[in-house]
Amino acid sequence: MESRLPVSKPLLLVLIGLIIGASLGLGSGYAVFYPNMVNENSRTIEGRVIDVEDNIGELGVMLDSMNQNITSLGDSLEDILALADIINGISDRVSALETGQVALSGELDDVEGSLSGELDALEGTLNQLNEDVVDLNDEWEEVIIDLADLETTYESANNALESIQALVRENDGIIIYTSYMANPSDGFIQDISDALYGQLIVENEDFGDWVAIFGETTAKILLNQEVDDMMGSLVWNPTENTEVGSDSYQVKLETYFRFELSAASITVDKMHVEIKATVNLDTGAISAKQISFVEIM
């Protein structure tokens, strides 16, 4: 078995000590045995030789036991040295761990300081953000109030606009009917002329006398010509505009005029005529035309 320097030196010292001890033991044994041999002069040489051999045998046994102890001690020293190497390795690892712990502690301190600074900055940012949110909430409440006011204003304006649109739509019927009356159909002119004839024949004596002379047919023809000539100059004003359907209105118009029948030399200072009809706003169609009122004023 190959021995390392740390093992051989102790073993060498032990062996030297054992040899010295054995020598001293031999010397002391001699000092003990020799007087006995002197005192036992009566013993024979053979007996003395046997005693010496016994003593040497006992000494050999002692040396064998001592040798075994030395071998066991060497093995123990080897185990101790191996254990010392393990302990040294563990010590080195512990030292390395301690060094790493110190370095880690420093890094943790640095990280803690950095995190503390970042947390402070974050807290400041959050505080500012909270203030901004509060300000924004206040501004938003003002915006909500403004929106509510705007909505109210919009509803009012929309209602007004709808009213205007409805009024305009109603006026569309009036415009359609008055435009028509600027140049009405021959049939409606005849209806107006007949209505005037009926009123004149009842209320104007001169007109009655004239009809009696020229006849009803001639009177109506001449009256119709006169009404046709003045129709474009009449001014028609709306008196009523009533909705009678989703797209239809009943429109009433009236006019005041001075009537002259040159063929009969008859003049009526003021006459009043009212007419009505149903106007479809989508198609512009005029239906149910009639003279609703005629009077001599």
Image: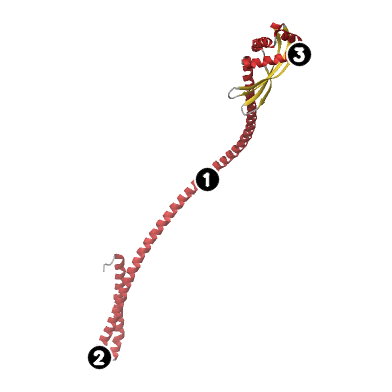
Secondary element at image label 2: helix
Ranked by sequence position, the earlier of labels 1 and 2 is: 2
Q: Can residue 101 be seen in this view?
A: yes
Say what amino acid the circle numbered 3 marks. Answer: Glu
Q: Position of residue 152 (x, y in %)?
A: 64, 32
Q: Distance between the residues labelled 1 and 2?
A: 103 Å
Q: Residue 297 carries which label?
A: none
Q: Where is residue 89 in the image (x, y as percent from the top left)?
A: 36, 61
Residue appearing at x 27%, y 88% in the figure: 51
Q: Which residue lies under the disc numbered 3?
A: 203
Q: How crowded is mark 1: few (under 14 residues within 10 Å), some or many (20 or more)?
A: few
Res. 88 image quadrant: bottom left
Res. 30 image quadrant: bottom left
- Work out whether residue 162 or residue 195 is closer to the camera in this orientation and state it: 195
Say what amino acid the circle numbered 2 marks. Answer: Gly
Q: Which mark is residue 119?
A: 1
Q: Is residue 47 above or below residue 9?
A: below
Secondary element at image label 1: helix
Q: Distance between the residues labelled 1 and 3?
A: 107 Å
Closer to us: mark 1 or mark 3? 3
Q: Residue 47 carries which label?
A: 2
Task: Name the colour scheme.
Answer: secondary structure
Secondary element at image label 3: helix
